[in-house]
Image (spheres, coloured by chain):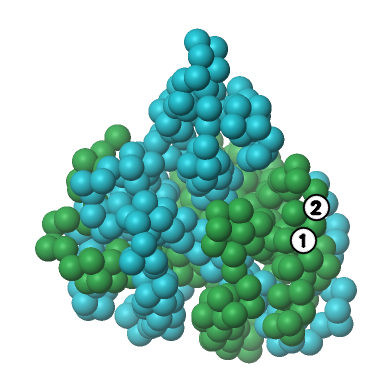
Chain colours: A cyan, B green
Amino acid sequence: MRISQLSAETDVPIPTIKYYLREGLLPSGEQTSATRAEYGEAHVRRLRLIRALLEVGRLPIASIAKVLAAVDDEELGMHRVLGTAHYAIAPATTPPPDGEEWQRARDEADRLITGLGWRIEPWAPAREELAQALYTLARLGMPMDEESLRPYTRAVETLVEHEIGILPLDGPRETAVERLVIGTVMHGRVLDVLRRLAHESASARFFGVAPGENGDKAHTDS
Amino acid sequence: MRISQLSAETDVPIPTIKYYLREGLLPSGEQTSATRAEYGEAHVRRLRLIRALLEVGRLPIASIAKVLAAVDDEELGMHRVLGTAHYAIAPATTPPPDGEEWQRARDEADRLITGLGWRIEPWAPAREELAQALYTLARLGMPMDEESLRPYTRAVETLVEHEIGILPLDGPRETAVERLVIGTVMHGRVLDVLRRLAHESASARFFGVAPGENGDKAHTDS
């Protein structure tokens, strides 16, 4: 198909598609003349993947480029692709000035991970993220330890076994890694939004308000 | 304490504290002279709450102001405060141009919520978020229905019951609502980071790589 059809097919404006082509996020089409290139289903799929990482995953273009490079690297095993995706979606954490308290949180995070028997690289950014969450919760007078974290660790262990279990590993590598990356980003978003929905619902029940009183409409405006 | 002590206590620079005072995020201290004000533990706690919503919750100042206003509004029930927090942390979603497919996703999201028997306000932004996730997943060839969402809905229902159950409702309202808001934001972050950690670990096991091969170090640089 022409770039115009590709644009119509994916709701991505032509200038944006050209930008992705220049940035190497999208492989160039098959040149049919000096001014024309043909694009195929692979381009449609790739564009949708880019938009998903951008709009739902909220990844910067540079991170998306890294993830796609890993997806396209035939040499790279599934696990390495996943690692690349993880490290790309991990939000930047800035260690607080209080070095000592921070170091305690950092050690606590490592202790928890070891205690769970999880296999996590020493340089995994999620270690810092967990430390930051523990540090902040402690300062807010709501410290969490292995015990209070258990409902969360149990929940994610179950979910993750399920997510890995449904990966189409018998098909082509490309499909499997694409789904791995999409799942990592999208299922995380699904879990987050469902948690907030369940929270609103449980709160409506627990605090027994009449329907129509969940944080009044005004708060949603502006 | 003086503003300088308040700053030292909370690692928040004095100019930032003054900015929060001007914006009304932080109640003014007790004026002891024309140029001096005394601050107390309440100010320390409030500053830490602001930083948590800002740094870990990643909320814009305007949303934080809304949440704090709800926390301080004695008239507002727990559930309304929670609603305000939820609607403040919900990321903005832009409906895709494809009106028809989007409407289907929107309806599907509503159907799912009804099917779960969840009590969610019609205007809850999380409905749009769920619709966007379903829409994107469908376009990526990974549609999710009630069945495939069940592991996630089960997990969040369990977690949320637990979170509501541990709220200190016998204490003063202020403590309860503060913890409710902190929990909504922080426990969501904890769940997200633990999920990614469990994912990395399960992947290391499942794809049977030797420790040291989780997405190589290079990907974490820059």
At 55% from the left edge and 54% from the top edge, which residue is drawn?
B140
Q: Which residue is mark 1?
A: B104
Asked whether residue B149 appears in the rendered view, the answer is: yes
- Give the amino acid type for the residue marked by disc 2 in the picture: Glu
Asked whether residue A87 appears in the rendered view, the answer is: no
Secondary structure beneath disc 2? helix
Q: Chain of mark 1?
A: B
At 25% from the left edge and 78% from the top edge, which residue is drawn?
A116
Q: Position of residue B94 (x, y in %)?
A: 71, 46
Q: Nearer the viewer, residue B84 or B48?
A: B84
Secondary structure beneath disc 1? helix
Q: Is residue A200 left or right of residue B217?
A: right
Q: Chain of mark 2?
A: B
Kindly indicate the quadrant of the structure image that contains residue B124. Answer: bottom right
Residue B100 badge: 2
Cα gap from disc 1 to disc 2, whole angstroms: 6 Å
Q: Residue furthest top?
A: A34
At 53% from the left edge and 27% from the top edge, which residue is drawn?
A38
Q: Nearer the viewer, residue A108 or A10?
A: A10
Dots 1 and 2: beta carbons under 8 Å? yes
Rendered position, B75 above or below A128: below
